[in-house]
Amino acid sequence: ARAPSGQQQRERGRRRGLSPSLRRTANRRSMGKLIIISAPSGTGKSTLISRLLSEHPELRLRFSVSATSRAPRGQEQHGVEYYFFTPEEFRSGIERGDFLEYEEVYPGRYYGTLRSEVDRRIAEGDRVIFDVDCVGGVNIKEAYGAEALSLFIQPPSLEELRRRLVGRQTDSPEVIEERLAKAELELSYAQRFDRVLVNDDLERCYQEFYETIRSFLSA
């Protein structure tokens, strides 16, 4: 799962993979429920997730801590901000099937979600929420099936998404064009999610977002 802020969200991958263990799901254990959220950048995903976690602690949703092959920065600690591994250790973990999903953002720089971390959260009584890209979202849904709810947040149109990205005033025109090109690809994944929510009105979308998740967790 990806935390909703910082480098963990900004560094997007060009090479992604599905761990070998995801092909062996027939005998998976009965586990707690998982919520998977994916969306193109600028769609309002982080706003929806932040508000949900703030307003509804009774849902007991928690992020898992991601793994990375980069070195710690500043005061970052293993198991707190990330689980830190060398590239060799990370690749070994991929071969063992340790990761629910992973991505290589450039040669030797990996990020991923440890199955053991998700299982630990569930054992502690938490429900796990994932803020991941579309490929990761599809992979996690494949691993957990009916135990997971996957939601795709969709903009009303690419033109509206462009307007929002420009209005944020955080990206250069070149970066905006890159994000729009990526968004067009990401939109092709929408129908592989359990539910598609169109964020054409933030309040209406949030209420649908909350009710969909609440209903799934209480079922």
Image (cartoon, rainbow, N blue to C red):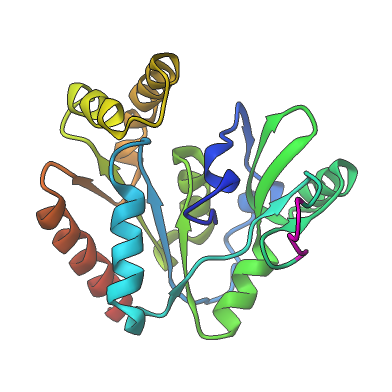
Q: Nearer the viewer, residue 56 or 117?
A: 56
> At 41% from the left edge and 80% from the top edge, which residue is drawn?
60
Q: Nearer the viewer, residue 175 or 206?
A: 175
> At 51% from the left edge and 85% from the top edge, which residue is drawn?
125
Magenta stretch prevailing secondary structure = loop
The percent position of residue 80, horizontal first and vertical second, equals 69, 67
- Magenta region: which residues? 73-78
Q: Is residue 215 left or right of residue 20?
A: left
Count of all numbered marks drawn on residues in the image: 0
> At 63% from the left edge and 42% from the top edge, which residue is drawn?
18
Residue 200 placement: quadrant: top left
Q: Is residue 28 left or right of residue 193?
A: right
Query: Where 122 falls versus 16 (above or below)?
Result: below
> At 38% from the left edge and 15% from the top edge, which residue is drawn?
173
Query: Where 211 falls versus 171 (above or below)?
Result: below
Query: Where 116 falls versus 106 (above or below)?
Result: below
